[in-house]
Image: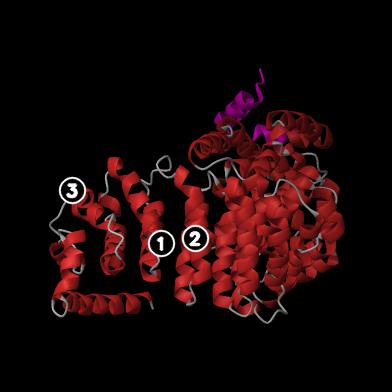
Amino acid sequence: MFDQVNGAFRKCGSNNSHSLIKPSKSFMLEVRLDSPNFSELLLMTLKSPPTHHNGKDRQKMFNGALSLELSNDHPNMRIIHRKVALILGQWVSEIKDDTKRSVYCALIRLLQEKDLSVRLAACRSLCFHIEDANFSEQGFTDLLPICWDLCFKLIEEVQEFDSKVQVLNLISTLIGRGNEVITFADKLVQFFQKVWEESSGESLLQIQLLIALRSFVTALGFQSPICYNLILPILQKGIDINSPDELNLLEDSLQLWEAILSNAPSMVPQLLAYFPCLVEVIERSFDHLQVAVHITEGYIILGGTEFLSMHASSVAKLLDLIVGNVNDRGLLSTLPAIDILIQCFPMEVPPLISSALQKLVVICLTGGDDHDPSKTAVKASAAAILARILVMNSNYLAQLTSQPSLMLLLQKAGFPAEENILLCLIDIWLEKVDNASSAQRKMFGLALSIILTLRLPQVLDKLDQILSVCTSVILGGNDDLTEEESSGDNMSSSRSQNEGPVPSKEFKRRQIKFSDPINQLSLETSVRDNLQTCAALHGESFNSAIGRMHPAAFAQLKQALKMP
């Protein structure tokens, strides 16, 4: 659409140049008096700028002829002014630092012209400059108030969809810079409220508004609740699957929902009440699974006990819908949310989501991964969740593995009926330790150390392997976590300098991760203590099993446990 308008204006400009040069000598004389370089400039600006010009040529041209002609307010200069506005947008990468401020001021001035086509061209080019990686925020800060006002005024005057989107893009880009948004938050809330009400029935425009609102929430960060009176009713409409506009608005509404949760300093009742809508979305399809998982994480992290007590059945239903019904990629994106849910509520959650956990057991114990990295990662992550349950709620894992319904599921998947489920899980922990992250390896180690306390003779058959894995984990340390903490600190520092503070949800997620009870437990102490229990339980059989260990492996075990 814009290209057509652009082409129409080129044609119009060409026709006008002929009418200026040919029919009216007196008018031509008048314009020449106002603009000595008019004819030369007209030819230059109505053609694409020559490609052989370098940055210095562009700057010289701007500081000379272009600036001079932009200062000419004659109504018939609008053709040239529009073309100059477009050219300045094409020159973004070639404008040097000492000229940026002048270009910004020129485009702001063009935004104030009476001609709508000139203002739209200036709007488009200004958007390019603000998006530029080398945008000078310092050179633009004092221009923000007038720029906002001009944007608000312009969007009221334009009628066509493309033009409205063009102005919204500039507004979103200004918001994306974020540093001064809070100063203009009240005006922006009023603006968005008015435009949203006027956009009723225009779903394509509402999509652009949802995108702009997402930028607005992100820019406000932990101060985003100041716009909740505007944004939560809009969100409620967008996530209603029975809404007539559901097909058009759902995707962007879900992304807005995620942004609200990511930046919320705390949960509010109205937002808390929306969670069942997410279950309805997933019931219809898995098209929005990734964002749905992020939203669920947000509710777990921000809502805490209140969220779980209010929406326990919805959480169970959501996870049961996902686990076992999505592909490996979808499952890999979901498992971290299950893990953090169990970490936060180790006693309450496992019985609540028993159906989903049964499916994780089936995933671990059936079907080979055939060296498929995705399947291997899924098995390792699922096994780590089951290991966490054993460490944090040992009694429940024993209940889970003895449930008749789990055995039926396993038999349907081809699992031998005579096999002991818990012993098979031990094999998975031993097998997948090399495919696990550092945190998961520690969970495997802690789970295996607890296995040493069981009154099962088969434990002695696996004693060499169990101790080998535990030794490896102890001596290997927790390098991944240390690296993540370091990168997290760097990210926080980087964001504070360039992008503002870390979003509330991310900050709280890190707090939860670093306060994980698994991190506080000593695998070395657990293995040492549980070895003593194992020796007491099995007596001479234990001594025989230890005696069968390779001398080098036993020496490493002594080193790991700091035994004399």
Residue denoted by label 3: 60
User: Which portion, as a residue range, is magenta?
Assistant: 543-564
Between discs 3 and 1, the one toward the N terminus: 3
Asked if labels 2 and 1 touch by Cβ distance under 8 angstroms, the answer is yes
Name the mark on residue 151.
Answer: 2
Position of 32 relative to 539 (above/below): below
Is the stretch drawn in magenta largely helix, strand or loop?
Answer: helix
Can you tell which quarter of the image residue 48 is in?
bottom left
Asked if labels 1 and 3 touch by Cβ distance under 8 angstroms, the answer is no
Which residue appears at 79% of the width and 71% of the height?
408
Amino acid on which disc 3 is placed: Lys
Which residue appears at 82% of the width and 58% of the height?
400
Position of 168 relative to 268 (above/below): below
Between discs 3 and 2, the one toward the N terminus: 3
> In which quadrant of the rendered image does the N terminus lie?
bottom left
Q: Is residue 431 visible?
A: no
Asked if labels 2 and 3 touch by Cβ distance under 8 angstroms, the answer is no
Q: Please indicate whether residue 399 sits to the left or right of residue 267 in the image.
A: right
Cα–Cα span, label 3 and label 1 = 23 Å
Q: Position of residue 325 (x, y in %)?
A: 66, 71
Name the mark on residue 123.
Answer: 1
For label 1, the crowd category at 10 Å Cα-Cα, with few meaning under 14, some 14 to 19 and many 20 or more, is many
Between discs 1 and 2, the one toward the N terminus: 1
Q: Position of residue 402 (x, y in %)?
A: 84, 59
Cα–Cα span, label 1 and label 2 = 8 Å
Q: Is residue 553 magenta?
A: yes
Cα–Cα span, label 3 and label 2 = 30 Å
Name the mark on residue 313.
Answer: none
Q: Identify the secondary structure beneath mark 2.
A: helix
Q: Position of residue 56 (x, y in %)?
A: 17, 46
**Given the current orientation, which residue lies at the most extreme top position?**
564
Residue nearer the viewer, 266 or 357:
266
